[in-house]
Image: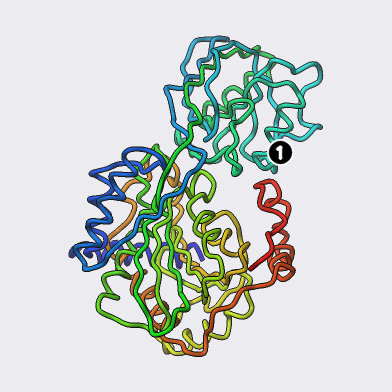
């Protein structure tokens, strides 16, 4: 599969050299002119205004739908090695790490974070060094650190090359009781080797990042259909604040832009709603707000576009009732245009489809892998526009547009909400309820 993925990406890069698609050109301007789009930041708001202006130029009337969220601002955070020598470590605080008075502490290697991995003795007041291979969720890491009396966690990165992968520290938006830092893999392993040889390691930790209330907005475009039932297509607009967010999720922004271009002047059977969500990275805040506001709105399904490369499959995300419609679409494409993986039906978590699933709405997405030599940089400084060849947008958007047009015209599809009991089964079937519980999203609410 990696070979297929790399070949598709290489073909996209080669065919894109002739000239950028309008949607890729818009994404390039968005990335270069505004930079990272952290939810609640001035850059995010300005970039969203630019998208709204672009959509108005296409003849649409985009609507900003504001929502409040637990915000977070990155400060000039520092973790400095004091012993056995002086060095400023390469770190990035996890979202919802909170400012505190600077302190000095010894470092203890926690291994994978399991009880059998931790060193013997009293660890109170120390800074824990945690391996990238830990099986623990962030909430479990926090609980473990608190039980041991640790003052901070240094979480070794899973990627090498000095990378720092930003991530949220709390899907519930709560200030973390102790700072957690992503630490460059090379430095983390360096510290681990010193500790394994019995060399004391001491650091100074100064966290300036802070949790602040924030207001943001989703951007919505509606294309009226012949019936009020809605087919929603969404992509998150926000990014982390280290790189440009070109892959995550600039790709989805551009694909939704291409869809808006293709649908101008059309009147589908089902009403179409295009949503650029904010707040996905910190905790799905924009899609939570949008799903909560649905009430009894008739919804056929939500298609989520989050880091979708050129599709090799379409995924009903565990909802058996969507599979027949997707198989009809796939058969209708004809042999040369069919996707290598066809129709899949595997549920997964932590993107903007999840709040809609919990509200009983059917959801789907694409299996569109991005090659490892590019995708390894997501959430990192190097998530930049050069990782997204123009034809990736053009070729992926062509498949997305084809599916959306087909589903929007399908009179056999009707609005439907899954009962709460069936929603529970949608997640327990794939063993996802434990993680949802740590995210504060389990059990599912009653559906309207």
How is the structure coloured here?
Answer: rainbow
Residue 63, compared with residue 81, is above or below; it is: below
Q: Quadrant of the C terminus?
A: bottom right
Query: Relative to residue 52, is residue 349 drawn left or right?
Result: right
Q: Is residue 158 visible?
A: yes
Res 243 quadrant in image = top left
Give the residue drawn at x 25%, y 79%.
265
Across and down, in percent, residue 103 comes to 58, 11
- Say which residue label 1 marks: 140
Residue 327 drawn at (x, y percent): 53, 85
What percent of the width, then of the height, locates residue 170?
60, 39
Q: Is residue 208 left or right of residue 190?
A: left
Q: How many labels were placed on the picture? A: 1
Q: At 44% across and 31% down in the image, what residue appears?
A: 73
Residue 374 seen in the figure: no
Q: Between 301 and 179, which is closer to the camera in this rendering?
A: 301
Point out residue 273 in the picture as x, y percentages from the top left corner.
40, 69
Residue drawn at the location 29% of the way across and 81% of the way down: 266
| Above or below, comparing residue 214 to residue 78 in the picture | below
Q: Provide the secondary structure element on which disc 1 rests.
A: helix
Q: Residues within 10 Å of mark 1 (few under 14, many from 20)?
A: few
């Amino acid at each position: 599969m990696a070979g297929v993925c790399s070949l598709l990406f290489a073909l996209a890069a080669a065919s894109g050299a002739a000239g950028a698609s309008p949607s890729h050109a818009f994404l390039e301007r968005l990335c270069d002119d505004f930079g990272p789009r952290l939810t609640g930041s001035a850059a995010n708001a300005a970039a969203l205004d630019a998208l709204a202006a672009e959509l108005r130029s296409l003849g649409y009337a985009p609507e900003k739908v504001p929502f409040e969220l637990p915000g977070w601002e990155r400060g000039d955070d520092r973790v400095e090695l004091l012993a056995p020598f002086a060095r400023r470590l390469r770190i990035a605080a996890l979202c919802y790490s909170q400012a505190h008075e600077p302190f000095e502490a010894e470092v203890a290697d926690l291994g994978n974070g399991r009880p059998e991995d931790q060193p013997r003795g009293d660890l109170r007041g120390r800074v824990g060094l945690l391996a990238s291979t830990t099986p623990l969720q962030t909430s479990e890491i926090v609980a473990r650190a608190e039980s041991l009396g640790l003052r901070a966690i240094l979480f070794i990165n899973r990627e090498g090359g000095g990378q720092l992968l930003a991530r949220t520290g709390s899907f519930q938006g709560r200030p973390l009781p102790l700072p957690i830092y992503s630490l460059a893999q090379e430095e983390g392993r360096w510290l681990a080797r010193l500790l394994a040889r019995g060399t004391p390691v001491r650091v100074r930790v100064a966290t300036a990042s802070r949790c602040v209330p924030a207001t943001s907005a989703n951007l919505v475009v509606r294309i009226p259909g012949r019936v009020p039932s809605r087919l929603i297509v969404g992509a998150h607009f926000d990014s982390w604040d280290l790189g440009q967010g070109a892959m995550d999720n600039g790709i989805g922004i551009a694909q939704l832009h291409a869809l808006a271009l293709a649908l101008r002047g059309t009147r589908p059977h089902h009403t179409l709603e295009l949503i650029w969500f904010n707040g996905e990275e910190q905790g799905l805040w924009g899609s939570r707000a949008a799903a909560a506001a649905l009430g009894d709105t008739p919804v056929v399904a939500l298609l989520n576009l989050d880091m979708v490369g050129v599709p090799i499959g379409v995924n009903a995300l565990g909802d058996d009732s969507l599979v027949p419609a997707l198989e009809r679409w796939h058969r209708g494409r004809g042999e040369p245009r069919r996707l290598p993986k066809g129709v899949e039906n595997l549920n997964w978590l932590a993107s903007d489809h999840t709040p809609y699933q919990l509200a009983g709405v059917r959801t789907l997405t694409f299996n569109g892998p991005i090659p490892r030599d590019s995708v390894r940089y997501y959430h990192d400084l190097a998530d930049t526009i050069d990782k997204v060849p123009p034809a990736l947008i053009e070729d992926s958007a062509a498949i997305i547009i084809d599916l959306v047009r087909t589903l929007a015209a399908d009179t056999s599809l009707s609005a439907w909400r899954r009962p709460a009991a069936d929603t529970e089964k949608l997640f327990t079937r794939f063993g996802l309820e434990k993680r949802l519980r740590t995210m504060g999203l389990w059990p599912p609410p009653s559906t309207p």
